[in-house]
Amino acid sequence: KKMFFLHLLLQISALAFVLYVFYFGRNHPGPLRWLNAKLVQGVDAAFDWLVPAFVRRRLNLLTETRNCGLQVVFLALLLGLFAGFYLTAMQRYIPSPSISHWHVAGVYIVVLVNLAFFLIASIADAGSISAENHAAAMSEFAYDGQVFVPRRLCAACLRLKPARSKHCGLCGTCVRRCDHHCYWINNCVGAGNHVFFLVWMCTLVGMTWYGSYLLFRAFQEHTRVHRLWQAYFLDGQGRSRQVTLSVLCQYLLETEPVMSGLFLFLLLLSVLLTGFVGFHVYLATRGCTVNEHSKVKTKKLSAFPYDKGVWSNLREFLLLHSGKRD
C-alpha cells in the first residue's frame, strides 16, 4: 500500500511540476525560466503541427482579444465537474453511514461561494486609471526609484504612469497596482479586485481538495458496501489470491471510470492550484504583485521595494479595494 501511494504521489507531483513550470516558470529567473522556454517551444511546435491553421487563429482570439471565452469554459467545467460528482458520489454515497449528511450542505456552500467570488472578481473594476482619477492614482504610492521611476509617460494613455501601475493592452487602460491580466475572469487583477481574485482562488483550492476528500470517502464506502477487501482474484498462474491495493484500484478504474477520473483530475488540480495560490499569498505577505515580482527578479534587486512587513502588507492588501491604506 505504501509503495502504491508513493508511486501515485510521485506521478502526480511530477505532472503538477511540469504544469507549474509551463504556466508560471517565466516568472522565475534561472532554471525554471529556461525549462519554461523549452516547454513552451515544444508545445508550440506540437500545436502548430497537430492543429490546422484556421483553428489556431480562432483559438488565438482567446488570448489576443478581451472576450468571455474562458469564463464560459470555467463555468462549463465547474458545471460538468459538479454534475459528475453529483451523479457518481452524492446520489449514491453522500450521505451514508460513514459520511455525514452535513457534507451535502458543505458541497453546495463551497460551490456557491466560489462562484460568487468568481463573478465579483470578473465584474469589479480592477483599478482603471482615467482622466478623472489620474491625480489620485499619482499620489497613491510613492516612486521607489528602481522598479518605478517618476515622469514616465504611458504611450497608449498619454498620461504619466503612477507608481505600481501597468498598462493592459487587452483592457485598454492603465491599472492601479496591477498584478496581471487573468483570462479566466476576462479582467485585470489590480487594486480594485485583487482581494476578490485571491479569495476566489482560495475557495477554488478548498473546493478541489474538498471534492477529492469526498470522492476518496465515497470510494471507501463503495469498497465497504461491496466488501471488496474480502474479495479474491486469480493471478496469472490461475491461483486464488486476496485482493491487493493495486488490484483494487485497477478494478475501481474499470468499474467506476467517471468517479475515478474525477478523483484523479481533482487531486492533480488541487496540487497545481495549491502551488499557484501559495505563490500569490506569499506575494501578498511581501507587499508585492506578480508584475513587480517579475521586475524585481529581472533587475536582480535584493528586496521588494514596497515591503512593510507581513502584517502591514496583509492589512494594506485587504483594504486595497476600499482605497484605504495605512
Image (cartoon, rainbow, N blue to C red):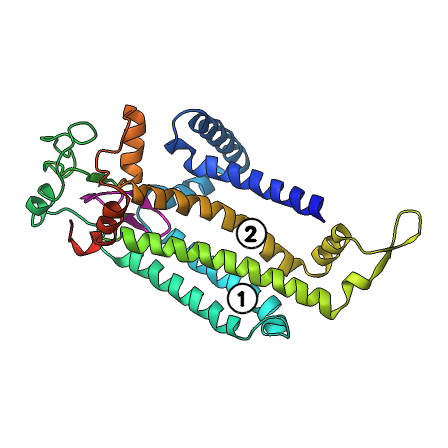
Position of residue 2 in the picture relative to residue 51 (left or right): right
Q: Which residue is mark 2?
A: 267
Report the front residue among 260 and 232. Answer: 232
Image location of residue 29, percent across then percent down: 38, 27
In the displayed structure, 310 sits above or below 94; it is above
Q: Residue at x 13, y 36 (%)?
A: 161
Q: Residue at x 28, y 44 (%)?
A: 310
- Give the foreground label among 1 and 2: 2
- Residue 182 highlighted magenta (yes or no): yes
In the displayed structure, 159 sits above or below 109; it is above
Q: Magenta stretch?
A: 170-188
- Name the image quarter holding residue 63: top left
Amino acid of disc 2: Leu
Secondary structure at numbered mark 1: helix
Secondary structure at numbered mark 2: helix
Please report contact status of discs 1 and 2: CB closer than 8 Å, yes or no: no
| Dot label at residue 54 | none
Q: Which residue is mark 1?
A: 83
Q: Earlier in the sequence, mark 1 or mark 2?
A: 1
Image location of residue 299, percent across then percent down: 27, 24
- Name the image quarter holding residue 287: top left
Mark 1 residue crowding within 10 angstroms, few (<14) / some (14–19) / many (20+) = few
Q: Residue at x 15, y 28 (%)?
A: 145
Amino acid of disc 1: Ala
